[in-house]
Image: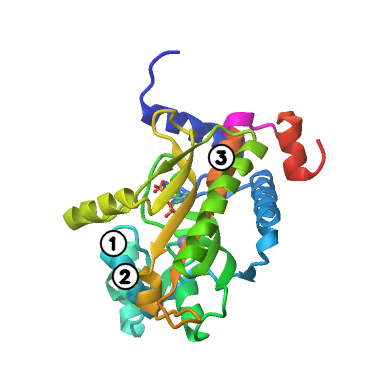
Amino acid sequence: MPYRPEGADQLAFLDALFDAGLLIETGVDGLYGRNGLFEDVIARFDELVTRFGRDGRPEVIRFPPGMSRSQFEASGYLKSFPQLAGTVHSFAGDEAGHRDLLADIADGRDWTGQQQATDIVLTPAACYPLYPTVARRGPLPAGGLLFDLQSYCFRHEPSLDPARMQMFRMREYVRIGTPAEVTEFRATWMERGKELMQALALPYELDVANDPFFGRAGRMLANNQRDQGLKFEMLVPITSSAKKTACLSFNYHQDHFGCLCGITTDAEETAHTTCVGFGLERVALALFRHHGTDVAAWPAAVRETLWGAP
Ligand code: ATP
Ligand code: ZN
């Protein structure tokens, strides 16, 4: 095979997705429409995740893709990932200000100066709105809690890699309880994640990982996270076989959110939390990459897993 730099592979796959109509261009890198087939694959995978997790009888909650700005500030996200955060701003001027705004747009000037921060920020990961919600309920019941979440998320990481979107959906299971309860949950899901990949006939590799913490202090946090094995990722080659893409993540936050939000166990100890995240678009892209854009030609076993019939 001729050598092609990684970027060219990403671009070729992105173009193939546009040509097949699976993704729809908007003019912004990482911001795409999805067609009915792409959505159907996502819905089927979402349902498969439900089947794999049903035995835990999770409580289902769906938050909108925006969360409370004050809860976001308290979460510590801006300490670690200021570069990824997205905030919602709105026009807050008077009629004269409105005229200025329209004139700025007409003359091609920056028109955003009168925009003011609202009480809403874009959700960076599906689990962020959950922790303050759980804290408000009071101490956990014995045995802790398990939640099933899904949300559109925003991360400011514009890229020509179709697997790195700015707006994408994350399904999550979040376990909150004692250290033993949450680490056992995460270990179980690392095994289930492999079964899930096998059921979809996708090549995979489970590896230790770190989050993209900001700045020089961030490098230390990232090393720490790796050394302690706090984050694992299920990697699948999508746009590069050298640099595989994280399709599932298994994050152990220890008592980070428990401390910040004041979540306690029934024994009045600070709760620990873990989340298993499923990148819905990334899994769909992995399926299209490995089995082709014609789903009728996908392996019979994969079709049966997703649609219940070969
Ligand atoms: P990466 O290392 O590739 O930036 P991540 O490990 O930081 O991803 P998490 O923060 O753990 O991602 O998010 C949970 C899941 O959301 C990931 O496993 C991935 O499948 C998905 N995801 C994360 N970022 C993106 C993105 N920019 N576009 C699409 N899916 C994403
Ligand atoms: Zn999470």
Image-quadrant location for residue 57 = bottom right
On screen, residue 106 versus residue 277, left or right, reads left
Helix, strand or loop at disc 3? helix
- CA gap, disc 3 and disc 2: 31 Å
Compared to 79, does 71 lie above or below? below
Image spot of residue 266 (x, y percent): 51, 82
Residue 80: mark: 1
Is ligand 2 closer than 8 angstroms to the Cβ of mark 2?
Answer: no
Asked if labels 2 and 1 touch by Cβ distance under 8 angstroms, the answer is: yes
Magenta span includes 309: no
Please state which amino acid type lies under the numbered disc 1.
Ser
| Residue at image mark 3 | 285
Determine the CA span between mark 1 and mark 3: 28 Å
Q: Residues within 10 Å of mark 2 (few under 14, many from 20)?
A: some
Q: Is residue 292 magenta?
A: yes
Residue at (71, 34) in percent of width and height? 295
215 displayed left or right of 81: left
> Residue at position x 20%, y 55% from top?
215
Q: Nearer the viewer, mark 3 or mark 2?
A: 2
Q: Earlier in the sequence, mark 1 or mark 3?
A: 1
Ligand 1 lies under 8 Å from the Cβ of mark 3: no
Q: Residues within 10 Å of mark 1 (few under 14, many from 20)?
A: some
Q: Amino acid at mark 2?
A: Gly
Are there few (<14), some (14-19), or many (20+) residues within 10 Å of tag 3? many
**What amino acid does circle 3 point to?**
Leu
Judging depth in this view, the residue of 171 and 119 nearest the camera is 171
Q: Position of residue 271 (x, y in %)?
A: 44, 74
The answer for how far apart the CA atoms under marks 1 and 2 are is: 7 Å
Residue 76: mark: 2
Query: Relative to the observer, which residue lies in front, 86 or 181?
Result: 181
